[in-house]
Structure formats: structure tokens, C-alpha cells
Amino acid sequence: MKTSIVYSSKTGNTRQLADAIAAVLPESDILYNGTPSDAALAADRIYIGFWTDKGSCNSEIADFLKTVRGKQVFLFGTAGFGGDAAYFDKVLSSVKKHLDRSNTLIGSYMCQGKMPQSVRDRYVKMKASPVPVPNVDMLIENFDRAATHPDTQDLQSLKDIVAQLA
């Protein structure tokens, strides 16, 4: 079965997941591996990766998902905020809305991903503000927790799921 791996990766997190998928699949089966392209649509199965933007996939992947028809699709993504399965499920539910019904969703995977230092700097500045910002300490703690993700365990979990599908 010919496969494509399509992803958008602003900080490199989602690319790490795409690389983990490519490492599991037979090289001869991979038709396309890269950013959204019509060339990817020639595959029978497409692994589609995104970074989370406002609770859904980024716009580049949302647009690509709308072009996918009659394929087996596996969604994967990263989110700076989270680590919580309920949040990831909510994001995936939003992403699935961009996918045409002619496709078969064969699986999905999400994990936390590190964020740019500028995000933490913004949180620290918010904390120093004379106007109290609710939950700012929680945001800083989440940023610090996310700094090591995707980690080895995240990547291995994804590889295990993909290996079961191959």
C-alpha cells in the first residue's frame, strides 16, 4: 500500500512525529513525505500531521484536509498546551470536521510539544502586570512541562500505533 506523510510543523515538533512515522514504514511504501502537496494525494493512506492553533489544526493542514478524498487517513498532531487526553480528543474532534466523509479515519495520535521561548516570556510579563492574570502560574508550569516534548516516550507510542497499522 502506498502511503504519504503530510505535515505542517512551525516549531519542529510535528516534524519529529512525521519522522517517527517514516521510521516505522517500509521506505518503498512511502510515496510522499513533506508539507501539503497534491503529490501526496496519489497514496492510498495518508498520515496527516498538524500543530494546534486555537483548538484545531493550523490553517495549512485544514485546507489540505479538504482536498483529501477516498483515502485511509491517520491524523497526528502536537499541542503546546495539554498533556490531557480530554483536551487532545477535543482538538482531534475539531480537526476531523475538515475531513471529507469519503475518507476512512484509521487512527490518530497527539502529544504535547514544546513552545517558543517567547511564549514563556509573555507569560512572565503577564505575571508581572499590575492587573492580575488568572492561571498565569499554571500557564508557566505547562510551558516548562512541554519543553521536553515530544520526548522519547511520545515518539515510541506513536511508532507502536503506526506499526500495528502497517
Image (cartoon, helix red, strand yellow):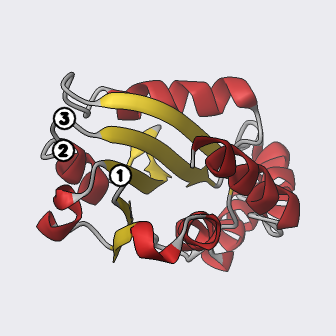
User: Where is residue 117 shown, x and y percent of the image?
Assistant: 68, 77
- Residue 64 vs residue 20, the one in the foreground: 20
State which tag comes first along the sequence, 2 or 1.
1
Badge 3 marks a residue whose secondary structure is loop
In space, the residues marked 1 and 3 are separated at their CA atoms by: 10 Å
Q: Amino acid at mark 1?
A: Ile
Q: Label 3, on which residue?
A: 70
Residue located at (26% from left, 47% from top): 62
- Quarter location, residue 86: top right
The answer to whether mark 1 and mark 3 are in CB contact below 8 A is no
- Quarter location, residue 61: bottom left
Residue located at (73% from left, 43% from top): 132
- Residue 18 vs residue 92, the one in the foreground: 18
Badge 1 marks a residue whose secondary structure is strand
Which one is in front in this view, the residue at disc 2 or the one at disc 3? 3
Q: Label 2, on which residue?
A: 68
- Residue 16 vs residue 104, the one in the foreground: 104
